[in-house]
Image (cartoon, rainbow, N blue to C red):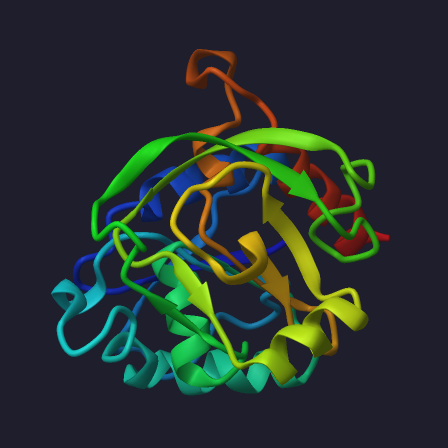
Amino acid sequence: MKSAVIVFPGSNCDRDLAVALEKVTGRAPAMVWHREAELPDGTDLIALPGGFSYGDYLRSGAMAARSPIMRAVVDAAGRGVPVLGICNGFQVLTETGLLPGALMRNAKLNFVSRSVALKVENTQTLFTSGYNAGEVIHIPVAHHDGNYQADADTLDKLESTGRVAFRYAEEVNGSARSIAGIVNEAGNVLGMMPHPERAIEPAHGSTDGLRLFQGLLETVNA
């Protein structure tokens, strides 16, 4: 699998994500600077890392969503290329319109940085095939603006069409219906606030994130 990690000024999880992808695929991803206009030929997976792109000015992810490379990302997503957005990457995906809703300030206005329990809601996606439906996994979060919100109709549609991939199994940030990760209608774009790339080694305290990347590799290469 040929992957690409998009790097914005302020990204700080791009190397962690690159390590996770290389560990699973055996191939280092291309690190694509935000000013580039095109993705490497033959890219099979695009990953948007966590961090504080552009210092979170205006809104988290708002400026990054207008970087030149994001036009290529949107086009690739429209062709069915898998796109994974983690934390700030999730924020960028909502700002581009690839995913609905918005990530607001946490309900208690504090930065949350700890391992949390997640319930796997849908295993029939490119990203979640390595899990069991209803399984509770443990993956770290680290965010100040992770409070997912959308209007009632959007939330109902996400629920009824199986587009909620992960749900918090505990109170974390006030997200509507405890949503931690969602996919687009086509199922090839996932945005999630927790950091699976920080749960791939026993030393991390959990390896539950590893199966996301392993399942993705198997699905893409199938």
- At which x and y percent is residue 156? 70, 75
Report the number of discs.
0
Which residue is pictured at 21% across the width and 58% down the height?
Answer: 52
Can you name the residue that lies furthest to the top here?
Answer: 203
- At which x and y percent is residue 31? 36, 57
Q: Looking at the picture, tell me which residue is in the foreground, 144 or 13.
A: 144
Which residue is pictured at 80% across the width and 71% down the height?
Answer: 160
Which residue is pictured at 16% across the width and 78% down the height?
Answer: 58
- At which x and y percent is residue 169? 59, 38
Displayed quadrant of residue 130: top right
210 displayed left or right of 170: right
Which residue is pictured at 49% across the width and 70% down the height?
Answer: 40
Displayed quadrant of residue 183: bottom right
112 displayed left or right of 181: left
- At which x and y percent is residue 186? 74, 77
Question: Residue 34, relative to residue 47: is it above or below?
Answer: below
Question: Residue 22, relative to residue 2: is it above or below?
Answer: above
3 displayed left or right of 146: right
Q: Looking at the picture, tell me which residue is in the foreground, 85 or 220.
A: 85
